[in-house]
Image (cartoon, grey):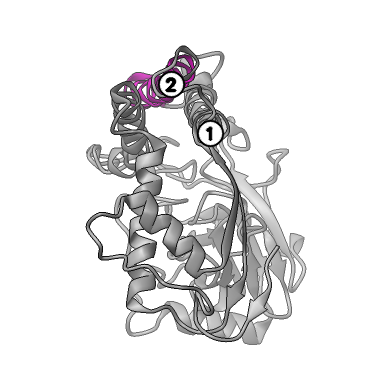
Amino acid sequence: MSVVKDGAHGTGTEPVDVNDPRLSRFDIVREGARRDDIEIVTYESQFQGPNSKAEKRVVRNIALLFLLCGAGALAFLGFYIFWPWEFELGHAPSDYYTPILGISLGVSLLALGFAILAWAKKLLPHEVSIQDRHNQPSSDEDRLITGQTIAYLGEEMGVQRRPLLKGAIGLGLAPLGLVAVAPLVGGLIENPHKDEQPNLFHTGFDPVPNGGKLVRLTRADHTPIRPEDVSVGGQLTVFPGIPHGSTNVYADSPTLLIHLRAEDAAQARAANYAQSETINRGSMWGNFIAYSKICTHAGCPASLYEQQTNRLLCPCHQSQFLITDNARPIFGPASRRLPQLPIELDDEGFFVAASDYKETVGPDFWERP
């Protein structure tokens, strides 16, 4: 319970000289309580004297929880570094990569949470106090008292006089700190573009594995697509017309084929040929444009097309891309535009990819513009 009073802290009390060297730290803390009109109702240890059997038992349990926290964090690091993570078809160890990371990190954080709760509930002294609040700022002496109070609380936590807890905290929290930076550092260890033909630069629309033949744009049932199949202002999800093209074997290949209105197509074509733009020149066919369906933020399907605003929305984190300006991100966390697929018609009048994507598809974090 608190009551608001006018005046500075401690108004109406007889102050004690807090600079008196004869005062203990707790005396200064108690004086600070008086000046703040605090009545300490209860302040007592939970144990019968220091280093009692009950206290040692609680300390051992809390130390065990901190060590369990560290063990879980070390397990996370071990799995993160050594467990097979690259995707493989069928039942493979990589299927368990994400679950074991979640379980090991969950055990670590759960143990840390229980350790903190047990410390507060079982180890710290019980205190009940009532304080009145004041409107005026604190004086220099009040700030000194506050500093001493914080130091006293540190003493009361008992870390200095409980070496087992000190060591357990160090051993438990150090690996957890490594866990926090491991994904950031781990993503920079291996260059995903190191191969002669980096995987991130090749999708199912690459004509090389197709015998050099341009790959058709097809529906999920492998039927090819003609321009008249997509109405003006409409869009269609297409896949590479190769074996398994619409399956997870080519999970990087889903593409949105959009039939723009004439005025919007003119705007998009002008953006493709802007002075600062080179990579997307000549990528459209007529009023049709095709963009990767995979969001460059976290790989979600950016497939919510707003026909009136020519925006493509990602439902996961609300990134928005402007179709008429090279799919430039205009809202949300995505920082890189959607790659554009060059398209044309083959001799039979079906859409084909004139080449593979010229930019990496999806969230490629190794190098960001």
- Residue found 74% across the figure and 73% down from its top: 233
Q: Please identify, in this view, whether the residue under mark 1 or under mark 2 is nearer the observer.
A: 2
How many callouts does the rendering have? 2
Q: Which residues are magenta?
A: 56-85
**Label 1 – label 2 distance at C-alpha:** 15 Å
**As shown in the figure, which amino acid type bears the numbered disc 1?**
Gly
**As shown in the figure, which amino acid type bears the numbered disc 2?**
Val
Magenta stretch, main secondary structure class: helix
**Residue 332 at x, y percent in the picture:** 55, 68
Q: Residues within 10 Å of mark 2 (few under 14, many from 20)?
A: many
In the image, is residue 232 part of the stretch drawn in magenta?
A: no
**Residue 281 at x, y percent in the picture:** 40, 73
Per the image, the residue denoted by label 1 is: 113
**Residue 273 at x, y percent in the picture:** 40, 81
- Residue found 73% across the figure and 74% down from its top: 307
Task: Say what secondary structure mark 2 lies in.
Answer: helix
Per the image, the residue denoted by label 2 is: 59
The answer to whether 290 appears left or right of 218 in the picture is left
**Foreground of the two, 226 or 106:** 106
Q: Is residue 138 above or below residue 148?
A: below
